[in-house]
Image: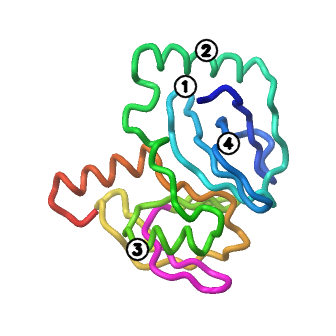
Amino acid sequence: MMNNLFELYLEDDDDSFIVGTSIAENEQQLLLVSIDDNGQVDSVEVIDRAHISKVVTDSSYLDFCQSMIKENQAAHIFDPFQLAQQLPHNWQSTDRLLAECQGEQRLISIVTGPEIYAGRVSLISEHQIGLQLVDFESVSFGAPTLIDKSDVMVIDYVSRQNYYVTKYWKTKGQQS
């Protein structure tokens, strides 16, 4: 795993990028495992191809990431929470993916151009997603927020941050 790393740039943002490797793809979407700045698995993401502006497959930074990944694999800390093994069943269709997340009460993150939302899916309509947002200060859910589907660039199906929040809720006896 991680032999075909790439830098993936999203539209309207030439300064930041996602480092990862593609697990599967179709005409509309990529399913990928992203890597953080320490060479560890950060998330499993579904990315809308329409929002991709550039893909870089050869760079000094990717060489450095590959080196960190090898070190982490040797130390058995590359994917300490087995996030890369938690692949969605219905990633090929955004609506089916969201329905899967809604049915599981899964905490997900959604990236639109300027915003990153974290919460649970509460509504799926033809043009919008209702996401009951997490209030990280109180570690609870707020009122649902509507997000236009056409604005969705990335859906983090599972991520390290959401893993920590879910684990915290489970230890506190709250619904995950």
Give the side of residue 115 with respect to residue 135, left or right.
right
| Callout 1 secondary element | loop
Horizontal side of residue 7 vs 159, given as left or right:
right
Q: Quadrant of the C terminus?
A: bottom left
- Distance, label 2 to label 1, CA atoms, is 8 Å
Residue 77: x, y in percent? 41, 24
Which residue lies at the image location 54% right of the left edge and 54% below the top edge?
156
Is mark 2 in CB contact (under 8 Å) with mark 4? no
Cα–Cα gap, marks 4 and 3: 26 Å
Which span is picked out in magenta? Answer: 118-131
Q: Which residue is mark 2?
A: 67
Amino acid carrying label 1: it is: Gly
Is tag 1's residue or tag 4's residue first in the polypeptide sequence?
Answer: 4
Q: Residue at x 46, y 26 (%)?
A: 78
Sequence order check, earlier mark of 2 and 4 = 4
Mark 2 Cα within 10 Å, few/some/many (few <14, many 20+)? few
- Tag 3 or tag 1, which sits nearer the N-term? 1
